[in-house]
Image: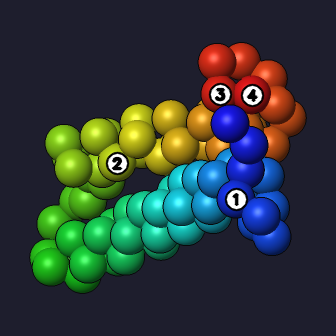
Amino acid sequence: QGTVPGMNPHSARIMGLALVGIGTFALIFAIVQHWRYVRGLSPDHPYSPWDLATIVSCLVTLLGLMVFGSMVLKAGPLG
């Protein structure tokens, strides 16, 4: 079995990189927006940015960065 004529053999990898990159950076922007929103809810109370949503999204962002790096460097299980 070969590839489809006229199709880039790396197009699946490029599409994966694009999707992981867009998702990771969108999540980073969502974290920043969440921090600003929560901080603005009660400006007179002390603000702790480490709620469950922030912790989980930071862990998913870290995972996304590692997957993206693995794909770019062609190293690890996704390389």
- Of callouts 4 and 1, the N-terminal one: 1
Depth check: give the residue in front, 45 or 21. Answer: 21
Outermost residue, right side: 73
- Residue at image position (68%, 36%) is 1
- Residue 39 relative to residue 76: left or right: left
The CA distance from mark 1 to mark 2 is 38 Å
- Residue 22 relative to residue 53: left or right: right
Residue 69 image point, x, y percent: 74, 38
Depth check: give the residue in front, 60 or 37. Answer: 60
- Residue at image position (66%, 44%) is 68
- Of callouts 1 and 2, the N-terminal one: 1
* Mark 4 vs mark 1: in front: 1
Q: What kind of residue is marked 3?
A: Leu
Visible residue check, residue 13: yes
The CA distance from mark 4 to mark 1 is 22 Å
Q: What kind of residue is marked 2?
A: Ser
Depth check: give the residue in front, 30 or 44. Answer: 30
The residue that disc 1 covers is 4
* Mark 1 vs mark 2: in front: 1
The CA distance from mark 3 to mark 2 is 22 Å
With respect to residue 74, does 53 lie above or below?
below
Residue 64 image point, x, y percent: 53, 43
Circle number at residue 79: 4
The residue that disc 3 covers is 78
- Of callouts 1 and 3, the N-terminal one: 1
Name the element at disc 4.
loop
The residue that disc 2 covers is 57
Q: What kind of residue is marked 1?
A: Val
Q: Find out whether the residues at labels 1 and 3 contact each other: C-beta distance under 8 Å.
A: no
